[in-house]
Amino acid sequence: MAYNRTLLQLRGAVRAATDTVEASGVYDDSWLPDDQLDHFINLALGDLYNMQVQSGLSQNESKQDITGTGATRYTLPDDFYAPLYCYVQTSSNTWSEISQIHLRELNYFRNLQGSGSGYPVVFRTVDRTYIDFYPAPNTGRAIEFYYVPNPPILVEDTDEYNFGNVWNELVEIEAAIKVLQKAEDSTTQLERRKEELLKRIEVDVEHLSMTQGMRMLRKDLRQFDIYPDWPRDDTGNDY
């Protein structure tokens, strides 16, 4: 794709930005060997990846297919980074969204464990290792869990990533700043460019927030009825 960047390309861009081009710059390869520069680059990738996910602008997505066993807890994939969406199959051709809950809401749903229709309506992730469902899904119940995978780690020269045009430049700048900090040199010019790019990202985040609804955390979940799929009896009361 047009914005794909390899480790080799990124290494050259960072050296150029910090005057560390081999044999002609202030800091040559003996001062900053490739393996140390790769470390700075991967740190920058992680920093910007986390910022992208937190802003809601990440385009990375993976899926885990889960089959219910009657248990509450299931193991997340090794590359799990952050949750996105979750769906449960409620009939042969119907899927319902499962809402993510906050820790403060846990006790309400934990006390209802074992009652209801046999399919979960809420989930929570634990220690980036497990996913818990309430109520526990019946054996054989199909669940689709969508999540953000771990950030890329570039090792080989041909390893590549693509965060998008603005974000790709930010990775280069962030890695270059780390190099100059190691040299105790001025980062003013790079910091100025970084601020310009962050302002452009703020516009994207603001646009995203204007087009997506906000979910409020409620203390009395039943009063506000924010879980319409939660199983109820014939009179409309929660199980």
Image (cartoon, rainbow, N blue to C red):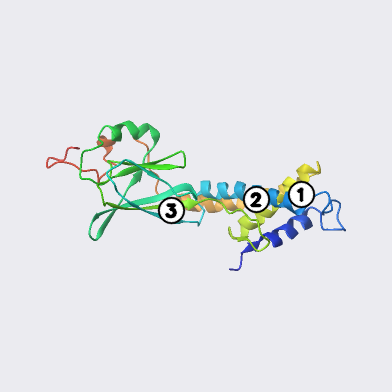
Can you give x and y, in whole percent of width and height, for residue 41 in the image?
A: 68, 51
Residue kind at label 3, given as amino acid type = Thr
- Location of residue 133 in the rendering, given as x and y in whole percent from the top left corner: 32, 42
**Disc on res. 211:** 3
Residue under the image location 83 percent in, 48 percent down: 31
Residue that mark 1 sits on? 189
Q: Residue at x 72, y 45 (%)?
A: 178
Q: Is residue 121 left or right of residue 125?
A: left
Work out whether mark 1 precedes mark 3 in sequence or the reverse, and give the earlier one. 1
* Foreground: disc 1 or disc 3: 1
Spatial distance from mark 1 to mark 3, Cα to Cα?
34 Å
Residue to which mark 2 is pinned? 42
* Residue 155 vertical placement versus 70 (above, below): below
The C terminus, quarter of image: top left
Question: In the figure, 94 relative to 73: above or below?
Answer: below
CB-based contact (under 8 Å), mark 1 and mark 3: no
Q: Is residue 207 visible?
A: yes
Q: Amino acid at mark 2?
A: Asn
Question: Rounded to the nearest whole Å, what is the CA distance between mark 1 and mark 2?
Answer: 22 Å
